């Protein structure tokens, strides 16, 4: 299992609000290398599959509906200690609790529309990266 990779999505709210460029700049200026990058959209079925780990949670239906509401940017990122460092860079899931200067503090509006996703473990980073990218799309 690689410990230097994480997976992220720029969510529909941040895309719609014009923050793709600013978020990618935050990512690269904080030392993450972009290994793979894709501008795409999730159908409700695909969003449900991606977030299937949360399917028993009360917010699952809203999460699936929101994540399939518009285009997203998916990326695999590389850096030493990637999972932990990226979670620090994005801030708490609930943007009202995110540290100043974090991506969610700067660009997110609510716990649903929270601008970005970041993997929570090496295992999930591999699963999530494989969900979007083939070997030919990684550099
Ligand atoms: P994300 O990191 O993409 O993983 C699951 C998402 O569910 C999370 O970000 C939030 O946008 C959303 N969500 C909505 N309500 C909650 C909640 N109570 N706890 C955790 N995640 C939530």
Image (tube, grey):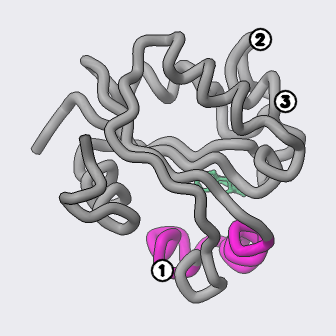
Q: Look at the numbered disc 2 and give the secondary structure of its residue.
A: loop
Q: Look at the numbered disc 3 and give the secondary structure of its residue.
A: helix
Q: Is residue 106 left or right of residue 87?
A: right
Compare residues 111 and 135 and report the one nearer the observer: 135
Part of the protein shown in magenta:
48-69
Residue 56 visible in the shown view: no
Residue lying at 76% horizontally and 77% vertically, measured from the top left: 65
Q: Look at the numbered disc 1 and give the secondary structure of its residue.
A: helix
- Which residue has dot 3 on it? 96
- Between the C-alphas of marks 3 and 2, the distance is 10 Å
Above-or-below relation of 49 to 26: below
- Between the C-alphas of marks 2 and 1, the distance is 32 Å
- Between the C-alphas of marks 3 and 1, the distance is 28 Å
Residue lying at 53% horizontally and 11% vertically, measured from the top left: 29
Compare residues 76 and 103 and report the one nearer the observer: 76
- Which residue has dot 2 on it? 100
Q: Which mark is residue 3?
A: none
- Which residue has dot 1 on it? 49
Please report whichever mark, 3 or 1, sits nearer to the chain's N-terminal start.
1
Q: Is mark 2 within 8 Å of ligand 1?
A: no
Residue 2 visible in the shown view: yes
| Quarter in which the C terminus is drawn | top left
Q: Quadrant of ligand 1?
A: bottom right
């Amino acid at each position: 299992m690689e410990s230097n990779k994480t997976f992220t999505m720029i969510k529909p709210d941040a895309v719609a609000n014009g923050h793709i460029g600013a978020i990618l700049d935050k990512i690269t200026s904080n030392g993450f290398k972009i290994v793979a990058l894709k501008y795409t959209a999730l159908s409700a079925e695909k969003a449900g599959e991606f977030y299937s780990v949360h399917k028993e949670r009360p917010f699952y239906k809203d999460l699936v509906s929101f994540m399939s509401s518009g285009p997203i940017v998916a990326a695999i990122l590389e850096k030493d200690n990637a999972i932990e460092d990226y979670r620090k860079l994005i801030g708490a899931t609930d943007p009202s609790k995110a540290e100043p200067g974090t991506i969610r503090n700067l660009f997110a509006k609510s716990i649903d529309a929270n601008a970005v996703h970041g993997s929570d473990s090496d295992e999930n980073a591999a699963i999530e990266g494989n969900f979007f990218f083939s070997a030919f799309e990684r550099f």
